[in-house]
Amino acid sequence: MSDIAVHPLVIGHRGAPGYRPEHTESAYRLAFDLGADAVEPDIVVTRDGVLVVRHENEISGTTDIAARTEFAGRRTTKVIDGKRLTGWFTEDFTWAELSTLRCVERLKRVRADNRAYDGQEPMLRLQDVLRIVDEESARNTRDLSVVLEVKHADYFRSIGVDIAALIQDELGQAGWADRPGRLIIECFELDVLTRLRQAGVRASYVFLAERLGAPADEIARAEAGGAPAKSFEWYRSDEGLDYLRTQVDGFSVDKGSLLRTNALGLAVGHTDLAKRAHERGLRVFTWTLRPENRYLNLRFHSSLSGTDWGDWQSEFAIVLASGVDGIFVDHPDLGVAAREAAQGSGTE
């Protein structure tokens, strides 16, 4: 899957958002400075077909658009993958317009220190992130990787936007459509992954799974009279893993799916999900490892404050002991430290 001789991969989740606002150039470059092997851009689309990097297509939480009076009239409400959202959406703006916005910290209460960087950096396009990775690879004299997450593919299809075709073109123009050892493409929907693979984009393909619910593309087909949507829980079953092995190269799950808990909800070890997936030839990734109490299992909380750092080392160690092939982290240096600790203890 990767030419990088490390295991597991430490993936900077939207860069290094534990230290800088997510999806900014400084966050991506810092991720590599802190030892990340790869970074993960989330991909959405503008009105004029430009692939931009944002957590969601609704951008009021990650940019200063709410304060931009010239765009006040474009605030609207939409249903995206079954969720009703009100705000400003990338598909209602041209890239020229979005390029005037500035990024802000999304987790304002949890990462208040990051707000010092609010308003300093513009949004990025996918082509910008690919350029950054190429530059950082040259600077670090090692091949760094990209984990490209396709966002809301079925929703964009429903409004006439073929995000798969746009991604194929962009990767080709940037020279990234033929780097299977360094490019991973992931999505919570299988359809778009199948289309990109059939189009000849050479990459490793990874299916993302939430704890609850079902893939948006399957729900749309079911509502149109097709077969019932298979739940994310089903995909974690042996039958689901057997199916996934015929469709993709890997499986990416929330970390809760890897933590075995007792009756009180306290982590007591890891599940066998990674083992069962490996038995079927699937790589296993997990998201998102974070040190703050509010994101840790209750067993590892250090205080009643959600913003305080807890015993992240112990939780990360359990996840790594499950045998995962890659971890998504907001603080890449912590991911590297956890990997080194696991290798030193012989649990890797």
Image: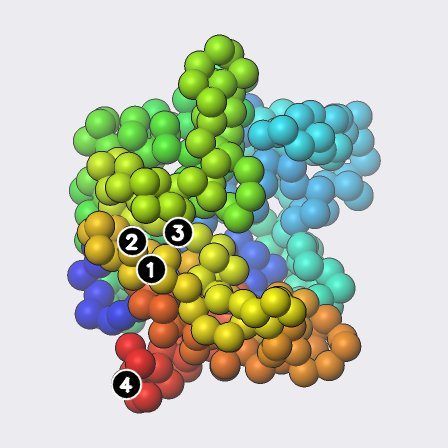
Q: What residue would you read off at disc 3? A: 252
Which type of secondary structure does the marked residue at label 1 adopt?
helix
Q: Which is more toward the observer, 81 or 256?
A: 256
- Give the residue type at disc 3: Ser
Q: Which is more toward the observer, 65 or 40?
A: 40
Give the position of the N terminus as an image quadrant. bottom left
- Give the residue type at disc 1: Ala
Distance from Cα at disc 1 to Cα at disc 3: 10 Å
Which type of secondary structure does the marked residue at label 2 adopt?
helix
279 lies above or below 306: above
Q: Relative to 68, is 46 on the left or the right?
A: left
Q: Which of marks 1 and 4 is nearer the N terminus?
A: 1
Within-10-Å neighbours for mark 2: few <14, some 14–19, many 20+: many
Q: Relative to 40, is 18 on the left or the right?
A: right
Residue 256's spot in the image, x, y percent? 52, 60
Give the foreground label among 2 and 4: 2
Q: Earlier in the sequence, mark 1 or mark 3?
A: 3
Which type of secondary structure does the marked residue at label 3 adopt?
strand
Residue 97's spot in the image, x, y percent? 62, 33
Q: What residue would you read off at disc 4? A: 346
Distance from Cα at disc 2 to Cα at disc 1: 5 Å
Q: What residue would you read off at disc 1? A: 274
Q: Which of marks 2 and 3 is nearer the N terminus?
A: 3
How many dots with numbers? 4
